[in-house]
Image (cartoon, rainbow, N blue to C red):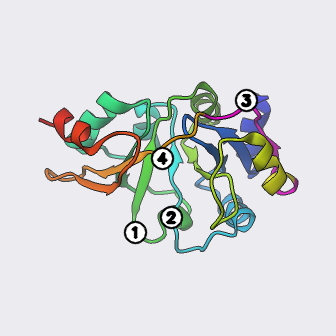
């Protein structure tokens, strides 16, 4: 199933998949057609950027992202896991991914299906929540199927995701890290790991 899902993504499709928090929607962030499809399925405003996931730090860097020293330390400490880092956008990404901000939110989830899907694709994939914009995100594949099933190219049903708090989003591109969204990793732990 994962190999088939990766092939769908390589051909511009959209796939729902589980992560260590909720179900997400994967698309090729370099494909304008795939990103247009993703935004259409979600009903997402085009001025909202889309987060990404990767199979590991090596995939993040091989895609073209440059990790600042503080970001590298946080990745070493909290990846895989629910910590999202802001990194400079790299060339080749569809503009909708960064919404004109030229930064990308990316993480390595602690879920074997999610990381293997990114690994099989060979590049980071999108990870916006698998729901219509404005509706509640879910860790239940049945809810994803009911809400989006007819519009998806595939749904990887690996049972319920753990749910819980969303990932913590941190911008550590400078010497003074900033908390952009509180989440599963407490801010105090982030700061302690940088001391």
Spatial separation of the CA atoms under disc 2 and disc 3: 27 Å
Classify residue 155 by image quadrant: top right
Above/below status of 48 relative to 178: below
Mark 2 or mark 4, whichever is nearer to me: 4
Quadrant including the C terminus: top left
Of pointers 2 and 4, the one earlier in the residue sequence = 2
Spatial separation of the CA atoms under disc 2 and disc 4: 16 Å
Mark 3 or mark 1, whichever is nearer to me: 3
Q: Residues within 10 Å of mark 1 (few under 14, many from 20)?
A: some
Residue extent of the magenta highlight? 150-161
Numbered tag placed on residue 158 in the rendering: 3
Above/below status of 119 relative to 17: above
Which residue does the image show at 43% across and 56% down from the upper left? 104
Q: Position of residue 188 (x, y in %)?
A: 22, 41
Q: Residues within 10 Å of mark 4 (few under 14, many from 20)?
A: some
Comparing 21 with 101, the one in front is: 21
Q: Is residue 109 visible?
A: yes
Callout 4 touching callout 1 (CB < 8 Å): no
In this figure, which residue is indicated by the disc labeled 1?
101
In this figure, which residue is indicated by the disc labeled 4?
166
Callout 2 touching callout 4 (CB < 8 Å): no
Numbered tag placed on residue 49 in the rendering: 2
Callout 2 touching callout 3 (CB < 8 Å): no
- Whether 153 is among the magenta residues is yes
């Amino acid at each position: 199933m994962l190999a088939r899902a990766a092939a769908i993504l390589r051909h511009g499709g959209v796939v729902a998949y589980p992560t260590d928090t909720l179900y997400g929607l994967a698309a090729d962030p370099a494909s304008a057609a795939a990103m247009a499809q993703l935004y259409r399925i979600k009903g997402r405003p085009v001025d909202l950027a889309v987060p990404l996931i990767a199979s590991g730090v090596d995939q993040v860097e091989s895609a073209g992202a440059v990790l600042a020293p503080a970001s590298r330390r946080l990745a070493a400490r909290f990846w895989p896991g629910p910590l999202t880092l802001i990194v400079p956008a790299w060339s080749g990404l569809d503009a909708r991914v960064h919404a004109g901000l030229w930064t990308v939110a990316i993480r390595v989830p602690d879920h074997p299906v999610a990381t293997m899907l990114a690994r099989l694709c060979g590049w980071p994939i999108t990870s916006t929540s698998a729901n219509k914009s404005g509706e509640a995100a879910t860790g239940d594949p049945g809810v994803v199927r009911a809400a989006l099933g007819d519009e998806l190219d595939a749904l990887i049903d690996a049972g319920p995701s753990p749910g819980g708090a969303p990932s913590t989003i941190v911008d550590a591109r400078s010497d003074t890290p900033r908390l952009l969204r509180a989440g599963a990793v407490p801010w105090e732990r982030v700061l302690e790991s940088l001391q």
